[in-house]
Amino acid sequence: MKSKLIILILILTSLLSGCSTPMKYQNSMFNNTFFANKVIYFSLTQQSDKVRIVKNGPNRGETKTPDNRDVFKKSIENLALETKLNLKYTENKLFAAENEIIVTVDITDLKWMFNFSSAKMVSSLKYDVKNGKNYNIIGIHKNNSGGTKEWNLYNSLKNANYLFLKELEKN
């Protein structure tokens, strides 16, 4: 009986300690000379509003369908706070000053994949920079508890936006 209790405690401890938390980007290293004095404006295409999350695998329950535009905007705002970069969301910015970069983003696919003990939200995004460069980025958020569509989408989009910024500074 005592050994079963110990095994149960070990299993619960491993499950609980394995739960993921949202990635924090405060300590992320960016090329300060590239991003210095730059403002990066992000806008989302109208088609992105229509993309729905497709669930795969065993899951229970249903949560409210998130507003992709609102969640994307929050992901940009919070990433700006965490990285201390000058990132802005805009509905429509046509012209850029010399220190501004305009990026149009298209959410092309949203998948929420479930396994026995984990879930993974995968967001596929296409970033079009006004200078003509295009980037296809996949954002991922994994966790062991499922959560809501909005929370997982937010973290997946934030991850994609971060990965885009890392690619942008390389070029």
Image: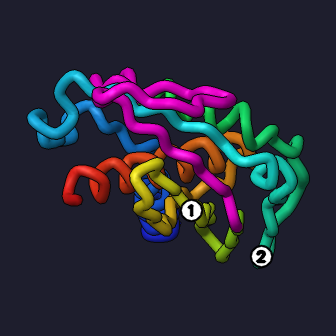
Badge 2 marks a residue whose secondary structure is strand
The location of residue 169, given as percent across then percent down, is: 23, 50
What residue span does the magenta drawing correspond to? Answer: 80-108
| Residue 76 sits inside the magenta stretch | no
Q: Nearer the viewer, mark 2 or mark 1?
A: 1
**Residue position for label 1:** 126
Identity of the amino acid at label 2? Asn
Mark 1: give few (<14), some (14-19) or many (20+) Cα within 10 Å: some
Marks 2 and 1, the one that precedes in the sequence? 2
Q: Is residue 145 left or right of residue 97?
A: right
Residue at the left extreme of this rendering? 33
The answer to whether residue 20 of the structure is visible from this angle is: no
Q: Considering depth in this image, is 29 or 15 the residue closer to the camera? A: 29
In the image, residue 45 sits, relative to residue 123, either above or below, namely above
Q: Considering depth in this image, is 24 or 41 the residue closer to the camera? A: 41
Q: Residue, x 17% and y 41% (percent of image)? A: 30
Q: Is residue 148 left or right of residue 102?
A: right
